[in-house]
Image (cartoon, helix red, strand yellow):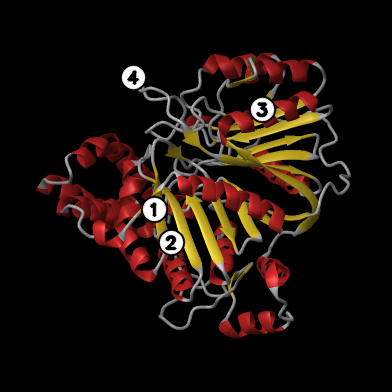
Amino acid sequence: MGFQSRAYIDAAMSHHRRKRRHLLASGLRSIGVIAIYASLGVLMACTSVPDFDQSGVRLSGTGSKPRIIGAYGPLTARQSKALLERLSPEPGDSGVLKRHLAIEQAVADGPLIGGNRTRILVDGPDSFHAIFAAIRDAKDHVNLEYFILEDVQSDGLSLGDLLAAKQRAGVAVNVIYDSYGSSSTPASFFDRLKQAGVNLVEFNPINPLDAKSGYSFNDRDHRKILVADGATAIVGGVNLSTTYQSNPLGKSGAPEGKSPEHWRDTDLQIDGPAVASLQTLFFEHWTKQKGSPPVSANYFPAVPPKGADVVRILGSTPDNAIPRYYVTLLSAIRNAEKSIRVSAAYFVPTHQEMEDLIDAARRGVDVRLLLPDRSDSEQAIAVAHSRYSDLLEAGVKIYETHDLVLHSKIVVIDGVWSVIGSSNFDQRSVLFNDEVDAIVLGSGTAQALEKMFADDLADAHRIDITTWEKRPFWQRVREFFSRTWQSLL
């Protein structure tokens, strides 16, 4: 898609996004509203998620689907079978882990790295405490890359004060923040960091005159990364925001007149050699955005093994012909043997994700989805609801949270394969956003996530298919037309 068509879409979406809350509230009852959505459906057709075969060519037929996806697209059924036949079957989780290790190695275009220690960080306060501790303990450098960057606090200390103090103490501090995600952050915060000597990069400035590497308003840096001394990293779904998440417009700053809500979120702390992969992603963005030369520091130290976890870091961008996280996720789902657990802030699945979840449930895999009953994106909820019937009929178990805003992005498969990162289970993460995700192979992290998932399920409501099919007709109409926007949600 050319720049002109993308710019046209951006302009149209900017106009209609301002209207969408009013339109949704009306239940899509007017002919004029339906006409708007129909016209946008034509406009957005060019942003649909393509199918790929093993060579990255769009599939034209409905032939048999490969079960494994390689670095350059899905493997053929014969290639998948040959890979699995090379593995001797073993009982129990050790065999399952061995097979997932082999599959992950087959699809990897980046290294699988052993010798890491990982720790689950539950919700904003836990993540903030770990982030502030890593910054305080840093002796050489601190690199931050966040969609939303605000002057958050932890244990009475503000982020701005801490970063400024570390920079003045001789620790190199480099920061990348997304221009749109952080557009409500006061300019005084960034000015204070600059005055302290902190090196700042604004990712894809909203103002095209400020862009240094081409202009694409719709491509956003959705990553959440902290790297301290090249040995400790924190990655996941928690923004450095006072609400741990964006407001209804998808950027920093809580809605006026609304009381704070509990945001359910998750991060992962990694100590070990895999941190170097996150460091590499950070500097790739720094270079691409033409940031000023960072202060000299030991950014890639030799890091000894810290634990037993095998980690693979995935950095996805719109520049990828085949999104790395997407093909890896599909591969793991297609090869699930026992269980799939998904905790998704925004469930706007591609048709391949839908097919693979349904196929897994039909072949006897215990598939469970934990989804929000309300969100800062009402349309994302509507799209998710439009998918429930097909999933429920196939045997997928769906649970909805209540009394909180679910923002975590977690998938656990077979109790041995886990992913925590910034990628949502949606089409925007596949098509537009720059994302980062950590694949962890090992039962320790998977079991910790499954326990957290089970605790969340205990407070959630399970969707019953009989009751679900009785929902009002106007709700079905709204769900149907919400799909017009699904690639941008």
The amino acid marked with disc number 2 is Val
Give the CA distance from mark 2 to mark 1. 8 Å
Dot in front, 4 or 1: 4
Give the CA distance from mark 2 to mark 3. 38 Å
Badge 3 is on which residue? 129
Residue 49 % position (x, y): 43, 61
Disc 2 on helix, strand or loop? loop
Residue 167 % position (x, y): 76, 20
Whether residue 244 is visible to the viewer of this picture, yes or no, is: yes
Badge 4 is on which residue? 257
- Packing grade of label 3 (10 A; few <14, some 14-19, many >=20) is some
Give the CA distance from mark 4 to mark 1. 30 Å
- Residue in the picture at 66% in, 30% down: 175
- Packing grade of label 2 (10 A; few <14, some 14-19, many >=20) is some
Looking at the image, tell me whether mark 4 or mark 3 is earlier in sequence order. Answer: 3
Disc 3 on helix, strand or loop? helix
- Residue in the picture at 65% in, 36% down: 290
Residue 461 % position (x, y): 38, 48
Q: Which of 168/453 is in front?
A: 453
Residue 66 higher or lower than 354, as above or below: below
Residue 102, picture quadrant: bottom right
Give the CA distance from mark 3 to mark 1. 35 Å
Badge 1 is on which residue? 487
- Horizontally, residue 43 falls left or right of residue 31, namely right
Badge 2 is on which residue? 49
Q: Do tag 2 and tag 1 residues touch (Cβ < 8 Å)?
A: yes
The amino acid marked with disc number 1 is Ser
